[in-house]
Amino acid sequence: MKMRAAALLLIPALVLSAGGRKHRGGPLVSEKDAKAIAARDTGGVAVSAREIPLNAASGGWEVEVHMPNEARGWRCVIDDDSRMVRTKERIANPPAPAHSRKRK
């Protein structure tokens, strides 16, 4: 009986200590994360991202990447669960973001 009471007293302490931790793995939660992953994988500048469904259980992001000094860019699909590029396909190079265009 004493053992059970002691265990019940420890449960709230364990829950509170585990709740404060932040982990890097897990699902993507923002457009910014998806753009960073696509830019790192292709070496270009991520222009736009939109959330898309992938399978019944998870979703993902479709990101368009501008490739400087190239005629073609990339469209990447990022998986929410694995945080990796699932597919990549070549597309017409999307316009560069306004902040990265050179002024004349």
Image: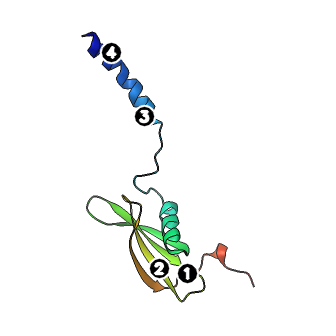
Q: Please tell me whether mark 4 sits on a helix, a strand or a loop.
A: helix
On residue 6, the disc is 4
Residue that carries the numbered disc 1 in the rendered image:
67
- The amino acid type of the residue labelled 3 equals Ala
Please provide percent x and percent y for residue 33: 50, 60
Crowd rating for badge 4 (residues with CA inside 10 Å; few <14, some 14–19, many 20+): few
Residue underneath mark 3: 18
Mark 2 vs 4: CB contact within 8 A: no
Q: CA distance from mark 3 to mark 1?
A: 42 Å
Q: Which part of the image, by quadrant, shows the N terminus?
A: top left
Residue under the point 54% across and 74% down: 43
The type of residue carrying mark 4 is: Ala
**Sequence-first tag of 3 and 4:** 4
Q: Are marks 1 and 2 in contact (CB under 8 Å)?
A: yes
Residue that numbered label 2 is attached to: 74
Q: Residue 89 or 51: which is nearer the viewer? A: 89
- Left or right of 45 on screen, residue 3: left
| Residue contact at pointers 1 and 4, CB within 8 angstroms | no
Kind of residue sitting beneath label 1: Met
Label whose residue precedes the other's in the sequence (1 or 4)? 4
Residue, x 47% and y 79% (percent of image)? 74
Q: Judge left or right: residue 47 versus residue 50.
A: right
Tell me, yes or no, whether the two marked residues, 3 and 1, touch with CB atoms within 8 Å: no
Q: How many neighbours does mark 2 have within 10 angstroms: few (below 14), some (14-19), or many (20 or more)?
A: many
